Image (spheres, helix red, strand yellow):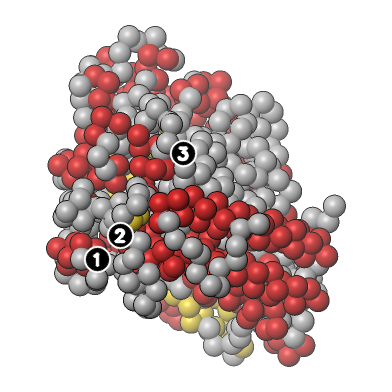
Amino acid sequence: IAQTDYKLWLQYNKVANSEKITEYQAINKNIVTIGNSETIQIAAKELQNAFKSLINKTVPLSNKTAESANIILANESNLSPELLNQTKTELQKINNEGFVIKTIQLKNKPQILITSKKDIGLLYGIFHYLRLLQTNQSISNLNIIDSPNTNVRILNHWDNLNESVERGYAGSSIWNWQKLPDFIDQRYIDYARANASIGINGTVLNNVNANALILTPQYLEKVKALANTFRPYGIKVYLTARFSAPIEIGKLNTADPLSSEVQQWWKDKAKEIYKYIPDFGGFLVKANSEGQPGPQNYGRNHVDGANMLADAIAPFGGIVMWRAFVYSEHDADDRAKQAYSEFVPYDGKFRDNVIVQVKNGAIDFQPREPFHPLFGAMPKTPLMMEFQITQEYLGFSTHLVFLPKLFQETLEADTFSKGKGSSIAKIIDGSLDNHQLTGIAGVANIGSDLNWCGHPFAQANWYGFGRLAWNPNLDSKTIAEEWLRMTFSNDEKFVLPVQEMMIESREAVVNYMTPLGLHHIMDTGHHYGPGPWVSNLSRPEWNPVYYHKADKNGIGFDRSSTGSNATAQYAPEVAKEFNDIAKCPEKDLLWFHHVSWDYKLKNGATLWNGLALKYQEGVNQVASMQSTWNKIKPYVDEQRFNEVEMLLNIQQKEAKWWRDACLLYFQQFSGKDLPSGVEKPT
Ligand code: GCU
């Protein structure tokens, strides 16, 4: 088996353009490191290895500048006065994880200086620099000043201790708990390196549906081994904290957050954890959600629970990421309203080291959701974004869907919380409400598969998540292009059509699964394939019929002021738009309105015809993805070409399955024929 796709976006293929390779060879003659941390050594080694394959050159490494061109790595405190002079102003503009890459003059020769406040910035800097080479950009006269916009850029692994992965579609967990702590799988190092290359600086190792055993000494030894492995790559380890752990592993008979023995138990536990892992990041908590234990089991609330853990961990510098993914069958008129109703009253009541983690939408990682109304509604509380990189509702690792397009749509959404221009990106990076603690989490799509993510293109979702976590204002088109050039080829004949295919892929999945604002009509439990007819589950809000509400009058969930009034949870400017059927963006129409089958869409088609045509469009889009892929065959290795070809064939079959199943089912209510242009189900 060729290992090509194991290398992710760090392929370091030999630069094909001869002018470029000459330019790169001339500038990269010596690597000079000043300082000797493990991080700087990793950075220098990465450069050496990369140069060997990118420009076919063995570049020597030393700690003294040579007479010829040098690429110099040194943090601020190790810069000679001469070097510092040339980068002082730039260094003032970066934060502790940022970097400067600047072409300077030394001994009358142009040199490239990569500098930073801390050594981790050097590692981020060399990966940025190598990206320039990987994507064939010019490296003369560089003056790059870059820092991450968020502090906590973190993967959430939903990995269980038995090595299964909840909603994981790429094999089993990469954490081999049985062999840890003594066996450090090369994969852990490769994982850390890949994450560092895109600026990810945190990882929650275990599932939000948590097992308290992870907090016992037996497991903490293993966690420590992973933390030690990741540390030089700038990655901190976090764990999920099962709220009932004091009972399960602590022999207490309560987990009441106001009980002093429970508080003491967590304080002691925190102290113990920090003995193993002095830079432990903190806890991620799913409490009183989908059957998980939490403070409400004791008549307490989210603030009581989060603050109790925050107090335990604060002396050591840890944080608590408290999830807002809550809903209950007892208040099931509209699940979309519940997190807001429950959390907004707590605004400003959490400790400084608590950040509330909110999914991008109010239901659950659908192909499209309007942004979560909590964004903008809790200005006194730091909120972090939770995206799902694993494709639970988007075709698992079988369908090609480029998620940064979805992420970007959410990040750009305007909450109007402080007037026009109050984008979610500004809430997440702390600039709108002036928060210091900021973050973005992504539910990982990584597993033991040889290619890490199951689908060769699912790697782009991991990559793109990291890039957007670093800079939430990046354009997903740029991300797709970078990734393609680094992962496959710089040939424009390959890059341009495939970039377009990736960008289109997100709308394609929306069209063939849930067009016009439909949502949560996937088959039950596993969430793969259509199941709009499912109506027999014990909790009403688990049934697809609860979400689409199709009847002979029409289809869609009335969340406007005449319905559940979920629209009132948005700022007035936004609510006004969503409330008014004529102004509501059509992409969200059936999310907010129950719409008659004869309603005229903006293009003049009736709702029924428009819906059917959208399903067909989704199928057509996948066909066009297939034809694009067939055309680029000369530019891709055989293995990855074949894999993607087979997967696109499945996606095409399943897009039709979605179209036929949904249209046949909804047709029972509309009672109308399919319009011309929509293929008849076979
Ligand atoms: C979804 C998913 C669950 C997960 C939950 C969560 O409901 O299906 O597997 O546990 O989200 O985010 O907590």
Question: Where is mark 1, residue-wise?
Answer: 581
The tag on residue 595 is: 2
Dot 3 beta carbon under 8 Å from ligand 1: no
The tag on residue 237 is: none
Compared to residue 447, the image places residue 272 above or below, namely above
Counting the numbered discs, the total is 3
Task: Tell me which corner region of the image, top left, top right, bottom left or bottom right, holds residue 490.
Answer: bottom right
Compared to residue 466, the image places residue 500 above or below, namely below
- Mark 2 is surrounded, within 10 Å at the Cα level, by few (under 14), some (14 to 19) or many (20 or more) other residues, namely many
Q: Earlier in the sequence, mark 1 or mark 2?
A: 1
Task: Locate residue 132, reporting x and y percent.
Answer: 60, 77
Question: Where is mark 3, residue-wise?
Answer: 534
Q: Is residue 56 left or right of residue 177?
A: right
Q: Residue at x 66, y 32 (%)?
A: 176
> Is residue 505 something that shows in the picture?
no
Q: Please state which amino acid type lies under the numbered disc 2.
A: Val
Describe the element under mark 2 as helix, strand or loop.
strand
Task: Locate residue 128, reporting x and y percent.
Answer: 56, 70
